[in-house]
Amino acid sequence: MERARWYIGCAGWALPRAVRAEFGPGDSNLARYATRLGAAEINSSFYRPHATATYRRWADSTPDNFRFSVKLPRAITHERRLVGCEHLLDEFLAQASGLGPRLGSLLVQLPPSLPLEGRSARRFLRSLRQRWAGAVAIEPRHASWFTAQAHDMLAASGVARVLADPVRHEAGAWPGGIAHLAYLRLHGSPRMYYTPYEPSLIAALARRIAMALESGVTVWCVFDNTASGAAADNALRLAQALGALKEKTE
């Protein structure tokens, strides 16, 4: 099994003016972003398809150890609601294959109105797993996905349940599904997509991630509070805090 790693980044790779000078030079925003952060989440794939060549260009803009997480299209999750979407999965994965080895994870975000229906959920996850053997994280938002039975189903499918902030359901305060992958999506709270995370919370989060790494858990932490430009700063501070903790233990 691959050594536990952390992947800290943002939803997208915007470089707000306040932190732009902290990034190195590059031919594009993504190339500059990748000088300081090791991962990014592609959310635009939820809204529209991207050509394989576009994914390949993004991969070529980043170093070998950089990883992308790519969000499944809403046609699969919100329109088809996980049912009868095998051909859509094939199209999406063929496009995202342009990332090559830099494709690190898939993100499946479900609509709040979609309850867990065991048969269709298992069929979808089996179909996805037949096509993609890498990391998969699912962000459900209906209460029925936060039960012991749902946790066991996800674990059996090799899928992690996202820990999303703000937390919608009590069981969502911890990651679920498989034990060796934790995927955090920090949207900002109390105002989603805007509120920055305070230094004290970033420091506590760094300690929590360090403990997970010591236990063999690979951690993705994606800041989605991008509307105010807070995400890039929060991601930088978290990466710095984790780096400092690593130095102390070596």
Image (cartoon, helix red, strand yellow):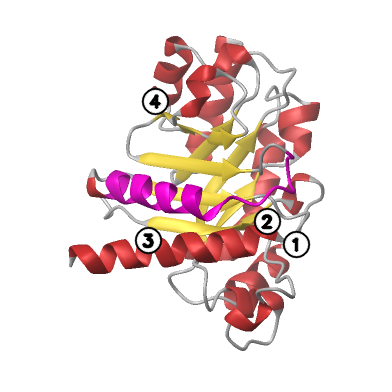
Q: Position of residue 108 (x, y in %)?
A: 62, 36
Disc ID at residue 95: 2
Foreground: 110 or 10?
A: 10
Question: Can I make out residue 116 in this image?
Answer: no
Residue that badge 4 annotates = 155
Q: Majority secondary structure of the magenta segment? A: helix
Q: Give the extent of the magenta segment.
A: 191-213
Displayed quadrant of residue 191: top right
Question: Crowdedness of circle 3 by 10 Å Cα count: few (<14), some, many (20+)?
Answer: many
The answer to the question of whether label 4 and label 1 lie on touching residues, with beta carbons closer than 8 A, is no
Q: Earlier in the sequence, mark 4 or mark 2?
A: 2
Give the label on residue 11, or none. none
* Disc 4 packing (10 Å; few <14; some 14–19; many ≥20): some
Q: What residue type is labelled 4?
A: Ala
Disc nearer the start of the sequence (3/2)? 2
Q: Nearer the viewer, residue 91 or 113?
A: 113
Residue 23: image x %, image y %?
59, 80
Mark number displayed over residue 51:
1
Mark 3 lies on residue: 242
Picture coordinates of residue 244, whole percent (x, y): 33, 67
Label 4's element?
Answer: helix
Q: Earlier in the sequence, mark 4 or mark 1?
A: 1
- Residue sitting nearer the eye, 88 or 157: 157
Asked whether the beta carbons under mark 4 and mark 2 sit within 8 Å of each other, the answer is: no
Find out whether residue 176 is within the magenta segment.
no
Estimate the spatial distance between the alpha carbons at disc 4 and disc 3, rounded to whole Å.
27 Å
State if disc 3 and disc 4 touch (CB < 8 Å): no
Tell me if residue 123 can be seen: yes
Looking at the image, do the residues carrying marks 1 and 3 touch, with CB atoms under 8 Å apart?
A: no
**Circle nearer the viewer, 3 or 2:** 3
Instruction: Tell me the amino acid under the disc marked 3.
Output: Leu
Q: How far apart are marks 4 and 1 (CA)?
A: 32 Å
